[in-house]
Image (cartoon, rainbow, N blue to C red):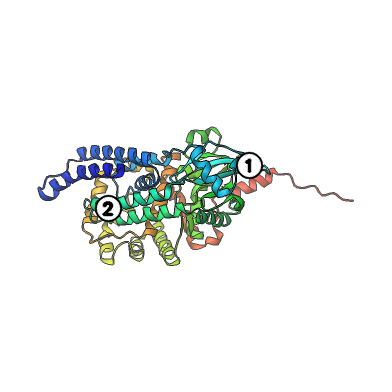
Amino acid sequence: MLVAGTLAPIYLSYTVPWLDEKFLGRPIDWKKMRKLHVANAKKFYAMATRMGGAMIKVGQIISTRADIMPREWVVGLSGLQDSVNPAPWSAIEPRLREELGDDPDRVFKEIDHESVAAASFGQVHRATTHDGQKIALKIKHADIDWKLDIDMKTLRIAVPLFNIFIPKIKLKAIYQEVGEALTRELNYEREAEHTRIIGKNLTGVPYVHVPKVLDDYTTGSVICTTWFDGEKVSKRKQIMAAGLDLHELINIIIYAYTRMIFADGVFQSDPHPGNLLYNVDEDGDPILCILDFGQVKMLPPDFQSALMMSAMAFMGRDVRGFEKSLVDLGLVSAKDAERARPLLEKFFDEYFELSPADLQKLDLRQVGEDVKALIDDIDGIHIPTDLVLYGRTFSLLAGVVTQLDRNVNGLMLARPMIMQALTNPAKLTMPGYEARAEAKNAKTPAPVSASV
């Protein structure tokens, strides 16, 4: 009832200005509309934080879809990444006891009853095994499955109603994205396997760490991994206070995702700050830890090939090639791609190399009007789910980079790495790594050989 009681008033609040514009020809008062967006985003935020589960995830996904959602919604819901309240130990202990077959306080040498982190469907507790190994236990909430079923049925009704306001963009794609994302997150056995796969793929990659899965304590509702002491990469002041180079950390993040997406074809698609931690190694260099593999995408070979051709054209500022790639990816028809050419040319000419700070100075309303005019002239836009996840990942990464340095264009930093991954993925290396490795070796005394 809370979901319906929140969504219905939001829907009605948009219906009046939409009817006025469509049937009475009255222009929309954008100043009032922005205030309405802010108010409605606050209502959704309050509902999501109270409901938890699926609604938190829906809000998180909306907050990353700046391509189709009003900025006020994106900003208003961005806080949902950190707004999940943990359940008390009394609610978690029975599930953990059932999964492990014994009292958790006996299974482990130590276990914290207070959660150290909470996600949409579960929460993390720190523990120590009897042999002294520090671990993290991610435990799924007992009642989450039936809550998810109810929430998704409500959203299934709401999506076509809200799609009336933006008929050219199929909101069903977002609904499908939400449903698939939630299903993946509830499958802890699959998440554990994804952790193993990506951990193996990134083995030996400098400055990147993936926790290891401990099979003895991992079940369908519990994932046990090695513990990583670290802080969120969004804590800019702490990073600088530790004497770390922000740009070096940015490069490590971009390199890790370039490798996962373009070289391995398997990537963690939820890189918000809560899932990216940092620490400092013994040499004073930053270490990036990637957590939470509930949202992992394995790109189909045909799609990855089309995606790589798209990236190649994009990096080379090849408008015609990029236009063709949009068709190959199934985003638009050949006819509509040709119509989009003027906007693509304008993007490459005016926006391609701008920093986030420069972007903030643009007349985003005019840019939005240009995009809206194009969409209105296109018969329909189909957004493949694979492309949605890919775009969402890059949107989250761009947000992380901007938090670390608002003047950095992450795409420009990624450009040489992506080009290297596209042309010779086996030779993909982190920029500057060889020089740092040589400097470290120069500081290390050569071994002394003993002669008899």
Q: Amino acid at mark 1?
A: Arg
* Extreme-left residue of the structure: 24
Picture disc at residue 430 = none
Q: Are marks 1 and 2 in contact (CB under 8 Å)?
A: no
> Which class describes the residues within 10 Å of circle 1: few (<14), some (14-19), or many (20+)?
few
Q: Is residue 183 left or right of residue 3?
A: right
Q: Amino acid at mark 2?
A: Ile
Query: What residue is at 90 percent from the left and 51 percent from the top?
Result: 452
Where residue 280 appears, as percent x and y from the top left, is: 59, 40
Q: Along the polypeptide, which appears first: circle 1 or circle 2?
A: 1
The answer, for residue 248, to whether it is visible in the render is: no
Q: Which residue is mark 1?
A: 106
Mark nearest the camera among 1 and 2 is 1
Q: Is residue 428 left or right of residue 331?
A: right
Q: Which residue is mark 2?
A: 157
Could you tell me how many numbered marks the image carries? 2
Name the quadrant containing residue 4: top left
Q: Is residue 347 left or right of residue 433?
A: left
Secondary structure found at label 2: helix
Name the quadrant containing residue 193: bottom right
Q: Nearer the viewer, residue 75 or 225?
A: 225
Q: Nearer the viewer, residue 443 or 329?
A: 329
Where residue 218 appears, as percent x and y from the top left, is: 57, 51
Q: Is residue 35 left or right of residue 110?
A: left
Disc 1 to disc 2, how far (Cα)?
A: 47 Å
Query: What residue is at 44 percent from the left and 45 percent from the top?
Result: 272
> Which class describes the residues within 10 Å of circle 2: few (<14), some (14-19), or many (20+)?
few
Where residue 101 appears, as percent x and y from the top left, is: 59, 48
Secondary structure found at label 1: helix
Where residue 69 appears, as percent x and y from the top left, is: 29, 47
Q: Nearer the viewer, residue 377 or 443?
A: 377
